[in-house]
Image (cartoon, helix red, strand yellow):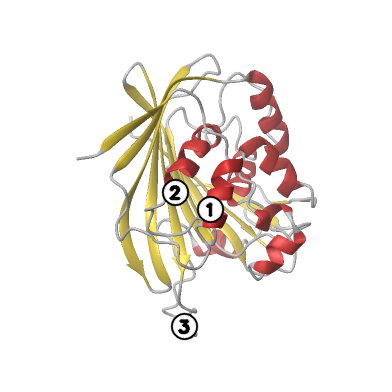
Amino acid sequence: MVAVVELSSGPGTGAAYARAALGMLPGARRGGALPEIEMVHRGVVVDRGHLAAYDRVCGFRLSDTLPATYPHVLAFPLAMRLMTMPDFPLPLIGLVHVANRITVRRPLSADSRLDLSVRAADLRDHPRGRQFDLITTASIDGVEVWREVSTYLRVTRPAEPRQQKPASTRDESDISGISPAAARGEAVRGGAVWRVPARVGTDYAAVSGDRNPIHTSRLGARLFGFPRPIAHGMWTAAHALTALEGRLPTAYTMDVAFKQPVLLPAKPAFTATPTATGWEFALSSKRPHLTGSVIAAAS
């Protein structure tokens, strides 16, 4: 039985990061399973000033229609509250966001009152550790209009050396539905070079509440093995969607896989190409940073 925890206001993320830091101390105890809890915040109203700030940071046009990635930000405090519970089986600090799927069932207006919910599911083994899914939904008048599945990995084992496959059998894309050309970032239709300034980490942290120090601090990044701060994965996913504004279906599913981090500042290459069902896109430098697709909902 899943217990529903109703919140009357969005919790702040500062205290959650403090709890996450305490959870890293020696002797901190954790549960062996995901908590059977659903965090719910009903009647969420969009702050248009915040929406405009988010649009500017991510590169969207100012609009009364919510970007597909915006409800992720609205629900992020609920996710933080859940993942920093004392019995959550994996510590928040050190989790790697490896994949994200967003389903938009219809366009969302900034005038909408949203009921948000977040729960964790499917704790499972991974060759490099343990991973789980965070399932977030947005509903209006009891009808689900938006859904997100974010996959997180806790790395506990080093990567095994890669086996070089013969050229004739090598799978150059490691997520279903992404073509080898998109995964390599070849010059397909819609290519552009992104100029990503160093301030993107702090700017996105301010509008998203995701103040993980790997994105905002050189010292924090170095503590986790990065030479300098890295861009938020959800910023790269959002910025990828800006290239498709005006060409997205009314209802669709966006799948992204986060590969190598984008070290800030950066000038990665973005490519996008239309398909029979939507779009494929990729962001890469010497190696892929992100691969993704947009697939229109069946009519």
Dividing the picture into quarters, in which one does residue 213 lie?
bottom right
User: Which residue is identified by label 1?
Assistant: 20
Cβ atoms at labels 2 and 3 below 8 Å apart: no
Instruction: Tell me residue 179's x, y (percent).
Output: 48, 60
Which residue type carries mark 3? Answer: Glu
* Residue 118 against residue 228 in the figure, above or below: above
In 3D space, how far apart are the residues under numbered discs 1 and 3 (Cα atoms)? 29 Å
User: Which residue is identified by label 2?
Assistant: 83
* Element under disc 2: helix
Is residue 142 something that shows in the picture? yes
* Element under disc 3: loop
Crowd rating for badge 3 (residues with CA inside 10 Å; few <14, some 14–19, many 20+): few
Which residue type carries mark 2? Answer: Met
**Quadrant of the image containing the C terminus:** top left
* Residue 105 against residue 267 in the figure, above or below: above
Which residue type carries mark 1? Answer: Ala
Whether residue 209 sits left or right of residue 102 in the image: it is right
In 3D space, how far apart are the residues under numbered discs 2 and 1 (Cα atoms)? 8 Å
